Amino acid sequence: MVKYLKSDEEVLKDIAQAAKDLRVEDLIPYLKAAEDWDKNNRDEFDDVHPAEQRQKTSFN
């Protein structure tokens, strides 16, 4: 069996400390990049919404 380097409790402490150390200024570049990606990666299907009711086709 593989032995992990850190226990679950140690990992949770590390995550909690990283969350405390995180500043809004650290996130701004990521938010801007996400906005740019969203603007530049739109395609012709982005504004297509599924029809609520499908139309039936009749054959004569």
Image (spheres, rainbow, N blue to C red):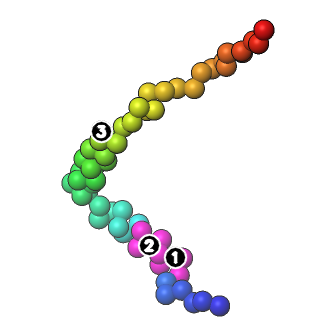
For residue 8, side relative to residue 43 (left or right): right
For residue 6, side relative to residue 52 (left or right): left
What residue range appears in magenta? 7-15
- Residue at 71%, 15% in the rendered image: 57
Q: Nearer the viewer, residue 31 or 42?
A: 42
- For badge 1, the amino acid type reads Glu
Q: Can I make out residue 24 in this image?
A: no
Q: Secondary structure at mark 3?
A: helix
Residue 39 spot, x, y in % from top left: 30, 38
Indicate yes or no whether the magenta region holds residue 14: yes
Q: Which residue is mark 3?
A: 39
- For badge 3, the amino acid type reads Lys
- Residue at 57%, 26% in the rendered image: 50
Q: Which residue is mark 1?
A: 9
- Residue at 41%, 73% in the rendered image: 14
Of badges 1 and 3, nearer the viewer stands 3
Indicate yes or no whether the magenta region holds residue 50: no
For residue 51, side relative to residue 12 (left or right): right
User: Which numbered disc covers residue 49?
Assistant: none
Whether 32 is drawn above or below 45: the answer is below
Of badges 3 and 2, nearer the viewer stands 3
State if disc 2 and disc 3 touch (CB < 8 Å).
no
Q: Mark 3 to mark 2: distance in Å? A: 37 Å
- For badge 2, the amino acid type reads Lys
- Disc 1 residue crowd, few under 14, some 14–19, many 20+, Cα 10 Å: few
Q: Which residue is mark 2?
A: 13
- Disc 2 residue crowd, few under 14, some 14–19, many 20+, Cα 10 Å: few
Q: Nearer the viewer, residue 58 or 17?
A: 58
For residue 12, side relative to residue 32 (left or right): right
State if disc 3 and disc 1 touch (CB < 8 Å).
no
State if disc 1 and disc 2 touch (CB < 8 Å).
yes
Residue 43 spot, x, y in % from top left: 39, 36
